[in-house]
Image (cartoon, rainbow, N blue to C red):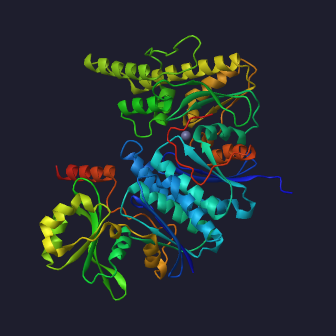
């Protein structure tokens, strides 16, 4: 009897065409990502129509590479998992329709996966989960605290009420005339600057684990604007350091507080902003104070990839979840 | 040879299953509904009705546009992935050519078109010649009035075919008069069996390289190119 599960994962929710093959949800057999960053750079951000055009051109090429690298036959594959949302609808559609075609051609089960569930499950390639588990999800589109009591079960206990953390990074980066994508540039500048400006921290209500970054963003805009009017020179490094200090402090404190309140056994960080050095350092420092283990995935698993979708898809498959041939892209899919 | 033909490039959803030139089954709807949700169930149903398994397919033929960008891509992503997974050849056929097949028995020019908004259309001029649908004026994205001037100048009868015919009927008749032949409504809907027929003997495309026939740059790209040009000149 066959005990191992091999799952194909497909991810096209934004500007990365990705296919991966994963064994038992814990071992990456192949993980191919075709990034489009270069072609969106000149527009200063991801252009949905252009992303969709690239996806449809890259899809079978990336599929072939993932299967070649894995050196696996279709007979061994148990299911095809795909990101059904959230994300850019036109981009998601390519992955969803490719996944349906593959599953149909090979008569394999099809499993739709939530993109954030994928980001969370990227951590399982590093270490097995322990429940209850708390995940801090931070990316260009998301800032969420997710509580998991068991596999495949997600409860959002806090989320952003306006901008995602990554969005705030991109906007501030644009104000500082940094190239796209701006997050890593701010992180780099912040490393050499000083927190000379005290930007606000949005703690919101005492009990809330929600986030808000629009106030901080406005404060940065006003500060730059006022300095210019007064003819003062602000160092970009210091603005970056001060901005990042505010974001990181709120993220770290709220995660810490939630971890203690819910008595979790493990805290994981997920999403593209998990690659941020300032955030990694602050979280590691904070959590070294208490006995809750903190897990941050390696950089290549923080950003969008398909191994994470196959990882989350493995659990969904093992729990008997199946999608029909009428599976659609859902740009505002809710986690849970 | 068992052929599966897929067309989701415009409002019509078309799926056909053929054995060489023989139609096994055909599914066509002309509804404002989601192609992504309905395409694979339509393929599944047709294959089941025909008692056929996916691995029995020998060729995929897909309508590659022009049309709705999203619609074209849904068909393309599905067709390319099917062809790759089954390791069978794929052929992409212009959606305009497929529509032109509705005028296969017409002896003069055939002009299929799709509305492309703001007075623009996606079109081309075809004629059935020597056993094939041959292109007489290149496919393009052009203002309807400009296009009609070119057609009228030919001083020959032109069969006009389009699911968007109602939007332009008056303009066509005004500019072309008796030279324009506009048939009854069912002739304006592309048939997936014609798509299969068009692709039957055509040389296969490279599965990886086959890409949509948009006939138009993405708006952001067009604007960007315009800006580059202006910067250079000014
Ligand atoms: Zn992501």
Q: On the picture, is A144 further left or further right than A77? A: left
Question: Where does the image place residue A284, in percent across and percent down from the top left?
Answer: 66, 25
Height in image: A178 above or below B41? above
Residue nearer the viewer, B154 or A242:
B154
Question: Where does the image place residue A127, in percent across and percent down from the top left?
Answer: 75, 37
Q: What is the residue that sits farthest to the top in this orientation?
A: A206
Q: What is the residue that sits farthest to the bottom in this orientation?
A: B130
Residue nearer the viewer, A52 or B73:
B73
Residue A31 visible (yes or no): no
For ligand 1, the image quadrant comes to top right
The structure residue drawn at horizontal position 66% and vertical position 41%, both measured from the top left corner, is A122
Residue A217 visible (yes or no): yes
Q: What is the residue that sits farthest to the right in this orientation?
A: A1
Q: On the picture, is A298 further left or further right than B89? A: right
Question: Where does the image place residue B132, in percent across and percent down from the top left?
Answer: 37, 84
Height in image: B141 above or below B138? above
Height in image: A226 above or below B46? above
The structure residue drawn at horizontal position 62% and vertical position 22%, both measured from the top left corner, is A255
Tell how many labels: 0
The structure residue drawn at horizontal position 27% and vertical position 54%, both measured from the top left corner, is B117
Question: Where does the image place residue B26, in percent across and percent down from the top left?
Answer: 50, 70
Q: On the picture, is A61 further left or further right than B93? A: right
User: Which image quadrant is residue A44 in?
Assistant: top left
Residue nearer the viewer, A292 or A80:
A80
User: Which image quadrant is residue A103 in?
Assistant: bottom right
Residue nearer the viewer, A145 or B137:
B137
Q: On the picture, is A158 further left or further right than B138? A: right
Quadrant showing the N terminus of chain B: bottom right
């Amino acid at each position: 009897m066959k005990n191992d599960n091999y799952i194909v994962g497909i991810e096209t929710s934004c500007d990365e065409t990705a296919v991966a093959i994963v064994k038992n949800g814990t071992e990456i057999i192949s993980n191919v990502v075709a990034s489009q960053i270069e072609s969106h750079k000149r527009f200063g951000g991801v252009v949905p129509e252009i992303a969709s055009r690239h996806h449809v051109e890259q899809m079978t090429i990336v599929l072939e590479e993932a299967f070649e690298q894995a050196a696996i036959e279709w007979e061994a594959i148990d299911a095809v998992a795909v990101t059904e949302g959230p994300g850019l609808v036109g981009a998601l559609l390519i992955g969803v329709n490719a996944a349906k075609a593959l599953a149909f051609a090979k008569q394999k089960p099809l499993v739709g996966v939530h993109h954030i569930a994928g980001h969370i499950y990227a951590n399982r390639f590093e270490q097995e989960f322990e429940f209850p588990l708390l995940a801090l999800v931070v990316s260009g589109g998301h800032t969420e605290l997710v509580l998991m009591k068991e596999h495949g079960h997600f409860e959002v206990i806090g989320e952003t009420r306006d901008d995602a953390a990554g969005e705030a990074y991109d906007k501030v980066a644009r104000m500082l005339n940094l190239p796209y994508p701006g997050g890593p540039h701010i992180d780099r500048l912040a490393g050499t600057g000083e927190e000379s400006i005290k930007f606000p921290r949005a703690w919101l209500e005492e009990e809330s684990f929600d986030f808000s970054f629009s106030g901080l963003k406005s404060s940065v805009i006003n500060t730059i604007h006022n300095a210019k009017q007064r003819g003062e020179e602000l160092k970009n490094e210091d603005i970056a350091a001060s901005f990042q200090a505010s974001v990181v402090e709120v993220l770290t404190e709220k995660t810490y507080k939630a971890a203690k309140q819910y008595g979790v056994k493990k805290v994981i960080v997920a999403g593209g902003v998990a690659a941020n050095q300032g955030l990694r350092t602050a979280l590691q420092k904070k959590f070294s104070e208490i006995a809750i283990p903190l897990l941050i995935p390696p950089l290549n698993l923080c950003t969008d990839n398909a191994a994470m979708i196959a990882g989350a898809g493995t659990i969904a498959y093992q729990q008997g979840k199946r999608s029909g041939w009428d599976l659609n892209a859902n740009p505002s899919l809710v986690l849970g | 040879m068992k052929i599966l033909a897929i067309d989701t490039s415009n409002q019509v959803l078309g799926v056909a299953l053929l054995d060489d030139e023989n139609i096994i089954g055909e599914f066509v709807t002309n509804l404002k509904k989601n192609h992504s949700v309905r395409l694979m169930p339509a393929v599944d149903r047709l294959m089941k009705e025909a008692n056929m398994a996916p691995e029995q397919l020998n060729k995929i033929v897909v309508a590659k546009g022009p049309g709705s960008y999203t619609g074209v891509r849904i068909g393309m992503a599905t067709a390319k992935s099917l062809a790759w997974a089954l390791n069978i050849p794929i052929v992409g056929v212009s959606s305009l050519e497929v529509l032109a097949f509705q005028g296969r028995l017409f002896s003069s020019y055939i002009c299929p078109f799709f509305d492309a908004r703001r007075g623009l259309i996606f079109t081309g001029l075809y004629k059935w010649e020597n056993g094939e649908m041959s292109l007489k004026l290149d496919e393009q994205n052009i203002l309807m009035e400009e296009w009609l001037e070119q057609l009228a100048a030919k001083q020959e009868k032109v069969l006009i075919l389009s699911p968007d015919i109602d939007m332009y009927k008056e303009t066509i008749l005004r500019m072309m008069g008796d030279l324009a032949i506009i048939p009854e409504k069912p002739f304006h809907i592309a048939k997936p069996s014609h798509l299969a027929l068009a692709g039957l003997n055509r040389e296969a495309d490279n599965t990886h390289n086959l890409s949509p026939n948009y006939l138009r740059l993405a708006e952001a790209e067009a604007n960007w190119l315009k800006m580059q040009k202006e910067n250079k000149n000014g």
